[in-house]
Amino acid sequence: MERTLIAQDQLIGTRFEKCVVERLIGRGGYGLTFLAFDGELQEHRVIKVSQDSGLDEGSRRRHLKTFLEEGLILSRLKHPQIVTLRGQGDKHGHRYMILDYIQGFSLRAVLDLVGQRQVELGCAWQDLLDPVTASALILSALYPMEYAHRANVHLPDREIFGVAHRDISPGNLILGVKGNEKGRLVLIDFGTAKTALTENVTMDQNLVGTIPYMGKARLQKANSPEQKAQYQDFWRDFRETQHDIHAIGVLYYQLLTGRLPFYGETSPQIIVKILDPEVYSQCHLDIASAHPYASGILRKCMVYHDFSLPLSEQPYQYPEAASMRPEMEEVFHSLSGGRSVNDVLIALGKKLAHPELMIPVDAGQKAKAVASSSGTLPQQAMPRTSDMLRAMPFPIKKRAPVVYAGAAAGLLLMAMGAAWWLSPRHSSLAPGKPSPLSSVVPRTAQAHPAPVTHQLPSAHEPAHDPARETLEALETAKPPTKPGKPVQAGAKAGSKPADHAKSGESLRASEPMAGADGRHLEAAAELEAATQTAEEAFTAGGESAKEDFVQAQSLVRSEDPAAFEKLTALLSKRPNSPDLRLLKCQLVLMRNPGAPEARADLVALQSSRPEFMHPNLFHEQQMYLLWQSDAATFEAQKTPASRINLLKSANAYLAEFEANRAYQAKVQGIKGRLPR
C-alpha cells in the first residue's frame, strides 16, 4: 500500500476504529500525534500515525517495522505509569496506534510555565519549583523506568531482556491531573526503545531522540557503529538502560536549576558540550555547591566515558533505574518533611492549572512550613555577638580600662545568660527536649554557588597564619594576669586579629602603665574570652562541627579526592554553615578560579557577614578570595564589567586590611595587580 505525506489537517474528522480525529497535538521522529474522541466510551484517545514519506525503500521498511514494534512493546508493558495501547492497525494508507490520553502537563510544559512565571515575577527558579518538587518528579519517573528496565518482552522473532526507553526527555513524561494518573508521571513514546532493529537507528542522518538529554555513549554509538567493534571491552558490559540513566540525570539537573547542563544554540554546539569532559566536571561542581544532597546522585547519572578503558575502570554509573531509586527515595524523604510523592505532585498540578497561584513563598512562611512538616523546632532569633557589640553605649575599640571592664562584664553576663538559657533546667523547655539552638531546620531550596582558589588556614598549622603569629607576639608582651583568673590567649580563633594588629603600636606604648596596673589588659582578654564563648554558643554543631570542618579542610588543603564527598556529606547536614560554604568555594575555585557561582556565594557571604567559626580570619579570607576570583575573571576576559568588579573587590579589601601589618604581603600583591 502506497503511503503519502500527511498534511496537518488531512486526517481531521477521520475515524480510526471508534475514534474520530479532532486535532493535531504533536510531531515526532516517526509520525504525527492527534487527539481523538471515542464516542462509544465517551473519552479522549491519542492516535499516533506513522509518517514515512521521503524515505528510500530500505529506510521505509525499517521505519515501519520500528513503528510496529513500538506497539508490540507497549502491549506487553503493563504498568500504571506507562501509557496503555488500546489498538493498532492500518487504515487510510497509514499505520496507526490508539493510546490512552493522559490529562495533564508534560514536563516540557512544566518547565516552560515555571520559566515564564520566573521572568514575570523576577524571582529565583527555586522559589517556584523547589527541590522537593523536583525530586518528587524524578522519583515518580523512576518507577515506570524501573519496571521497563527489568521487563522481559517476548516479540515474535526474539526476546528482549530489559527495555531501554532511549528518549527520556520532558516531552515524554506527562504529569497526570485526573483519574488514576493524578499526581503521577506517565511515560509515553517508546518509538526509540531498544530492540535489535533500533539499536543504531538514525533518521535522515539525524539522531532519533532529544539531543540535549543524550550522553556521550549514545552519540558515539549511534554515529559510529564501528565504535562497538573497536572498544569491545567497554561495550561488552555497557547496558542500554544507562542511556536512560544519563537522560534522567540531565532532567534532574534541569528541574533543580532551570537550565540544561549541556547547553547550546544549535544541535552541533550541544553535541560538542556533551563530548567535553570539562563540562561534566563543571556541572558536578555547580550542583554540589547549590544542591549538595543531589550531588552524589547526579555524579552517578551524568558520567563521561572513556571508551579506551573497560567499563569496570570507568566512573560508576547506575546500570538501571532500580539502582538509582533507593538513593533518590532517601533524598526525597529527607527533603519532603513527611509528604508523599503523590501529595507533592498533586499540589504541583493545581499550581500548573492556575499559574497565578505559582508565587514565591516568603522566608517566614518557608521556615514555618519546614518546621511544622519536619517536626523540629525553629531556631530562635538570638542576637549575634557582633550585633551585641555594636549595641554597646560606648565604642569598644577604645583602650580605656573602664571601658574594657564594662564591656567584659556585660558580655560575660550575656554569655552566662545564654548558657543558662541553653541548660535543661530552662523552664520553657520540656525535659528531654533538645534545645532550639541545636535544632537543624532542613532547608529545601539551597542555591549556594561554587568556587575558591586560596587555601584556608588550617587549625593544625597555626604557624602558617601571619595574623596568628602577630597576635602571639603581642601576647608575649602582656604582663601576667592576676592569679585565679585564667584568661584565654589572644591568639585564640575567636579573637580579633585585625583590631589587635592595627593597635599593636599603641599597646606597646602603653606597656609601662600595663606593668603598673594590668587591669585593662586583663579586661581586654576577658572581653576576647567572652566574645569567643558567646560566638561558640551560637555556632551550630559545637565541637563536633569544628572537628568535621577541620577534617574537611585538611582534605581540601591536600587536594584529596575524598574532599568533595566529605564536604557534600557535611553540607547535607549543615547546609547553612558559612564555614562549609566558604570551604566549598575554595574547593571549586581550586579547579576553576573564575567560576561565577563561587563569586556569587562570596558576595552573599560578604553582604550577610555571618558568624564564621573564626570570624576575622574567615572574613579576611572571604574578601581575599573574592578579589582572587575577580582577578582571574579579569585576566580571562578584560571587559568593562570585569574591570569594575575587580576594582570594587580590591578597594574593599584594601580599605579594611591595608593598615594591618599581618596582611601586607596580600595588600602589596593586590596593589600590584590593579588595572590601569
Image: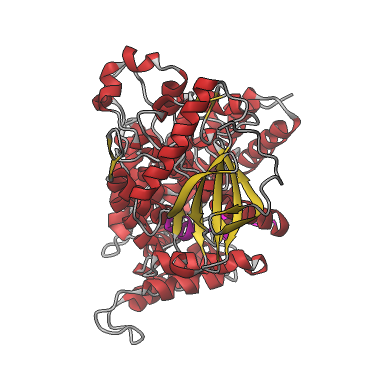
Q: Is residue 132 magenta?
A: yes
509 within the magenta span: no
Image quarter in which the N terminus is found: top right
**Residue 612, above or below 672:** below
Start-end of magenta stretch: 122-136
Front-lying residue, 538 or 180: 180
> Is residue 361 visible in the rendered structure shown here?
no
* SS assignment for the magenta stretch, majority: helix
Q: Residue furthest bottom?
A: 427
The residue under the point 40% across, 61% down is 335
> Quick one: 632 or 400, which is closer to the camera?
632
Drawn side of residue 312 relative to residue 373, left or right = left
Q: Is residue 488 left or right of residue 107?
A: left
Q: Position of residue 243 (x, y in %)?
A: 39, 35
Residue found 49% across the figure and 53% down from its top: 99
Q: Foreground residue, 102 or 69?
A: 69
Q: Image point 60% across, 33% down: which residue?
A: 3
What percent of the width, then of the height, locates residue 462? 34, 38
Q: Farthest residue toward the front? A: 1
User: What colouring method underlies this structural image?
Assistant: secondary structure
Quadrant location of residue 120?
bottom right
